[in-house]
Image: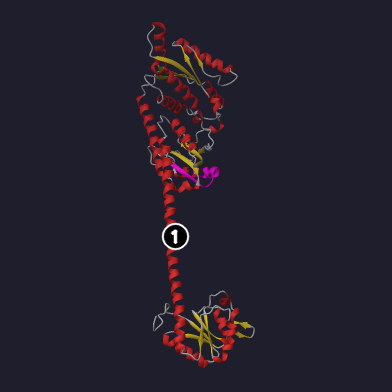
Amino acid sequence: MSGSVQLKKKDFQIALLIEDIAEAKIISDGLREIGIFAHYYQELDDLWVSLNTYTPDLCIVDVKKMSQGTLLFKQHQKVKNNTLKFAFYYKDETKVLLNSCFGLNHYGYLRAEVNIVEQLRSILRRRNEELRLLDLTETMEGRVNRLKLRSQRLSEQEEKNSLFISQNNEAQMLMNKFGKVSNIDDLNSRIITLFSEWDACLEFGLYQLNSTNQKLVSPRKSTPKYRALPDLWLATVCEEGISEYAQEMVYDVSYGVMGDKIITLKIHGTNDLPEMLLVASFQDKYLENIQWEMLENKLSSEFRKVLANYYRKDERKTFSDSIFSTMQNMDDIAFHKVESKMRYAMVDFSSLVNMIKQRSGNRFYWQAFAKEFTTELAGILSGDFRISHFGVEHFIVGIDKKFIETDYQKLTSFVDDFQFWRYFEDSSLVVSNDLAPYVKFIAPSSVNLIRQAAHDVVDFMHRETPNPGRQIEV
């Protein structure tokens, strides 16, 4: 800046506190020559009040106006905290008053007897450069802050993406461990096992329609995270899956048990509406990041496989024999030494039948029980097997000898795990241990079969405990 002052700010503001109006006009004319209009104050108290409302870019103060009554210029808050920038005006006759300026951080002196314009240019160059640097600093700080915010957003997004990927990988690994299931009980057990092992899952429950499609039941399993929810009677039969109002009932009940931070996975079979509902509570960060639709699709896929297997087995019915055919085959072995390809096991339901008789007011759904028990059992047995009914208290299972060791274990485990309680209209009144059947091998003879069945009935009446354990008879 050689001959002029290039102002950084278009609205550069200067305040003049000068006692003599004529002298103030000289300074004002000089500023106008540079391109600046000044605000004039004759008394310190007027300037004092104005400084409380705004801060000029520069204030030129007459050394004769450094005080007024009890007011001291140097005691103004903006002077003390260095937010007000100022220079001093004096004449030779008031030079002695410059003593009152000592110790103040000012921008120089304007001497009345010297060319005012050139003195103003010198002071304004310094102040203008300072303002330019302040603007530049503010601009750079704004850029730095924007970069910091952008970096923070990128970092947060990267963390979110990483969390999203890791949590979905965890969910995918969980689904990869699902394995193969052959019936509804297996499916329920596998779901309960996997969600119990999922660290992010805090607690969960499972609902499905019972055989009448008018009640929602929750499998009775004992794991730390699983909640066996109360049975829900529905106002109407849900032939096409769990209706919307029934889903709302499930949410209300689950909300009371697990709190409000829950998600509901809808497991679909062959209907548009879900046929199973899994309600779970998760850690907060999982609620947004997991692809729940992926889990729903996986669980629905496994459920449809179970249904397809169920209907396929149900349609085939090659495993079902009449009791008379079974007794005929037994006698062929006993009387004619015909080589048998099977070993026969008897499943005794005396405990279940006795419970039904004792609680006759609690309806038992016989047809659904017999159909689902035999079909699901057929889904786990191997080779050429047969299942027949001997009255309501005994099922006779012909196990293929080639698979005798594995299938007998499958049979006993299946009977132990089968949820007989769900076929009672009011399952809340049923204790599972009271229903436990037992399994034993029997010798191939129709007479022996009849004797064993009669013996089981008599033995049950004298038994001290409902389940004495399994027996093996050759």
Viewer-nearest residue: 303 or 374: 303
Residue 232 image point, x, y percent = 51, 39
Vertical arrangement, residue 192 with respect to residue 116, above or below: above
Give the residue number, with chain letter if any, for mark 1: 148
Which residue lies most toward the bottom here?
Answer: 22
Residue 17 image point, x, y percent = 54, 86
Viewer-nearest residue: 242 or 293: 293
The stretch drawn in magenta includes residue 50:
no
Viewer-nearest residue: 361 or 351: 351
The stretch drawn in magenta includes residue 259:
yes
Can the viewer see residue 239? no
Count of marks, rendered view: 1
Residue 259 image point, x, y percent = 54, 45
Vertical arrangement, residue 13 with respect to residue 258, above or below: below
Q: Residues within 10 Å of mark 1 (few under 14, many from 20)?
A: few
Which residue lies most toward the top here?
Answer: 336
Which residue lies most toward the right here?
Answer: 70
Vertical arrangement, residue 170 with respect to residue 27, above or below: above
Q: Residue at x 62, y 83 (%)?
A: 71
Can the viewer see residue 462? yes
Please name the amino acid that badge 1 sits on: Lys
Q: Quadrant of the N terminus?
A: bottom left
Local secondary structure at mark 1: helix
Scheme of image coloration: secondary structure
Residue 361 image point, x, y percent = 55, 29
Q: Residue at x 41, y 49 (%)?
A: 161
**Magenta highlight range:** 250-265
Vertical arrangement, residue 469 with respect to residue 88, above or below: above
